[in-house]
Image (spheres, rainbow, N blue to C red):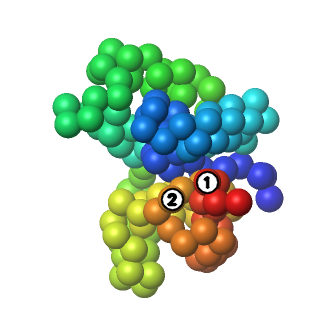
Amino acid sequence: MNGRVLLDTNILVYIYDPLDIVKQERAIAITDQLIRSGKAVISTQVLGEFFMATTRTRRLLLTPAEALVRMRNYLAACHVVDITRLISLEAIRGVETHYFGFWDAQIWATARLNQIEEVYTEDFASGATVEGVRFTNPFID
């Protein structure tokens, strides 16, 4: 179809997490390549989760001001999909039909309803395809 890839929050968080240097380097390379090719997609859900994951006091990766700068950069560099009522309803169907957790279902629904065939994430079985949406864990070779 359009070759766009929805990036899940965990991919973006690894860019700023020095705890696993291999994943950090891979996340940087993947995100950079997708942005440069014009295929990177994020959702407003991913942006909110990114802020919370990188600024929590338990394991501070970025200050709120730093996170805001990064979020603005992603807003400028990526195609951004808003979470709509239809996405929320489709997510609920994903919970009922596929037994996804709600937030994961919302990622799936965002991709499905926006005709994005692939999601890069660690939260689904890599290689699985659900109603036309393929899940890829980019950290697995």
On the question of residue 47 being in view, the answer is: no
* Residue 26: assigned label: none
> Percent from the top left, x then y, of residue 139?
61, 54
| Foreground of the two, 12 or 26 | 26
The residue pinned by badge 1 equals: 139
- Give the alpha-carbon distance from disc 1 to disc 2, as whole Å: 8 Å
Which quadrant, please, contains the N terminus? bottom right
Give the residue furthest to the bottom.
Answer: 97
Q: The residue tagged with tag 2: helix, strand or loop?
A: loop
With 134 as the anchor, is 2 left or right in this view? right
Which quadrant, please, contains the C terminus? bottom right
> In the rendered image, which quarter is residue 54 located in?
top left
The residue located at (53%, 27%) in the rendering is 75
The residue located at (42%, 52%) in the rendering is 84
The residue located at (40%, 46%) in the rendering is 45
On screen, residue 102 above or below 129: above
With 103 as the anchor, is 57 left or right in this view? left
Name the amino acid type tagged 1: Phe
> Percent from the top left, x then y, of residue 138?
64, 54
| Foreground of the two, 7 or 57 | 57
Name the amino acid type tagged 2: Glu
Q: Are marks 1 and 2 in contact (CB under 8 Å)?
A: yes
* Residue 122: assigned label: 2
On the question of residue 67 being in view, the answer is: yes
Around disc 2, counting alpha carbons within 10 Å, would you say few (fewer than 14), some (14 to 19), or many (20 or more)?
Answer: some
